[in-house]
Amino acid sequence: MVCRNAANAYHQVLLQVGTDQLSQNTPETVVEPAPLGDEAMDHNEANFVGPADGGMIGSNNDGHDSDDADEQIDEIEETIEVTPAENLPRQSDQYKIEQFPSAHAGSPIQLGTAVQSEFNNYRQLIGSNNVYAPFHSQLDWEIARWAKIHGPSSAALTKLLQLEGVIQTLPLSYKNARELNNIIDNKLPSRPSFKRFDIQLGGEETIMYARDLLQCIQALYGDPAFARHLILKPERHYRRTGDQWSRFYHDMHTGNWWWEIQNTLEATKPGATLIPVIISSDKTQVTLFSGKTAYPVYLTIGNLPKAVRCKPSQRGQILLAYLPTSKLTGVTNRASQRRMVANLFHCCLRRLLSPLEHTGVEGTIMTDGDGIARRVHPILAVYIGDYPEQVIYRSKLQHAISTLFTAPFHQSTATLEYIRACKDAGIKPVYHPFWEPLPYIDIFQAITPDILHQLHQGLFKHLVAWLLQAYGAPEIDARVRRLIPNNHIHIFPNGISRLFRVTGKEHNFIS
């Protein structure tokens, strides 16, 4: 009962925070990062688009997709029960929507030259009206789709195509897995390519692989599959409860942040279309024994409804970069090592997000999937990460307050004095945080709650340890085993006192 009350109270806090911060969700399933090589990444990131209407049917992964992975993604997507914004009633006796007062917000602009949609651009590029191009026919495309989503390995596919009569009976545009991969990599519309950045620090050379931020935003904003889903201006939604109307929040455009920033832009740049940029990162352990890690950074935009962003199969997220994972072992002083790692993190993110410094204020022209041009202002709205990462990019400890944090950055003091001032304030000495030059950003409001580390491990883990100490492990285990089976109740037949390497799902069951 105590755990449930604490959970309910915490979720109420999350709901209140969500109304101001517009809480977002990272994808429940993250594909394990590919080897950090140009060829490997280009191959892994090739977009397997089917018919030329831009519909996505999978990704080129050299035949390593398994039925188990597909079933896992399907199971996750079935648990995401959200109502798309376009399916909500616009006005009724129980529901009403307040539109943004400016009629210029999100409005198209007229360009001197005609702008075509991405579909028409691609059709002209390939020089064909065949909707299945660059494949010859629907059968050709269907077999390629099967081979990359549900098919066997590359070697098995090659042996299948080499059987006598297969190529002659099925008029395919490829004779083996290598030719199929070449079509996917070179003849289908692809997302921006990666670039390599070498960074010298602490006597070591670290590497960052990254895509251009604005090109990634254009890839999402201009995707024909998302054209009908794009949200271009904020709204306020109300629901009747008895005789009173109460405002409720179900997506990013219904919150306060978008409305306030849109007001600010309209005062200086009328006709602006706001693109809320959502960044998420999570350091991932790639191998179990050697301890190799990868540090992927993902990008999505708030113009896509959460029903699209939360489903991996919708491809509403883009892998933006791989950050360096070096621990700078050549630096012997532990304090200096931690300080350099934190500054390296901020330096890399500052480089990634630098295009937002100018375009966030002045705007830039982008076209959506229907070829409609607008002046867009991409602005960092949300940064999603677990609590240990939040401490890094906030560069502050739990007890430090923001006024103490921001004050030292504007003081022209020597390095030692600056470090001493940060130590007295209880914060890490980061000289130039990545969000410092970004417009319209408050990093403390951009951070979303971390359920795993702040609730399950930050609250329930200590509560369970306290109960085990107060009542004893045998008594707690006995009570857990006697729980009556019911919906949403997980039974631990051996109790919970001896669990080790507890996953986030098990933490949720315990709570």
Image: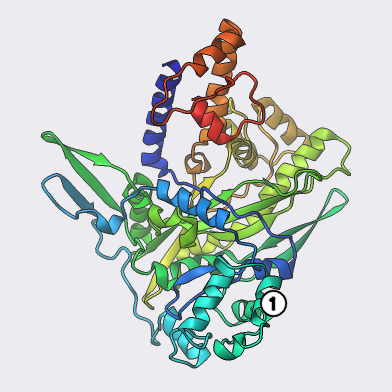
Residue 128 seen anywhere in this rendered image of the structure: yes
The residue at 56%/35% (across/down) is 504
**Label 1: few (<14), some (14–19) or many (≥20) C-alpha neighbours in 10 Å:** few
Looking at the picture, does residue 353 appear above or below residue 214?
Answer: above
Residue found at the far front of this picture:
164
Determine which residue is flagged by label 1. 159
Q: Quadrant of the N terminus?
A: top left
Amino acid type at circle 1 is Lys
Left or right: where 113 falls relative to 219: left
Residue 420: give x, y in percent of width and height. 74, 30
Quarter of the image for residue 151 reads bottom right
Left or right: where 475 falls relative to 310: right
Left or right: where 51 falls relative to 353: left
The residue at 54%/71% (across/down) is 146
Residue 233: give x, y in percent of width and height. 32, 59
Residue 232: give x, y in percent of width and height. 34, 62
- SS at circle 1: helix
Residue 303: give x, y in percent of width and height. 40, 59
Between residue 439 and residue 210, name the one nearer to us.
Answer: 210
Left or right: where 405 falls relative to 314: right
Residue 440 seen anywhere in this rendered image of the structure: no
Between residue 472 and residue 429, name the one nearer to us.
Answer: 472
Task: Tally the numbered discs.
Answer: 1
Between residue 316 and residue 280, name the one nearer to us.
Answer: 316
The residue at 65%/74% (across/down) is 157
Quarter of the image for residue 5 reads top left
Looking at the picture, does residue 319 appear above or below residue 368?
Answer: above
The residue at 36%/76% (across/down) is 372
Looking at the picture, does residue 127 appear above or below residue 348?
Answer: below
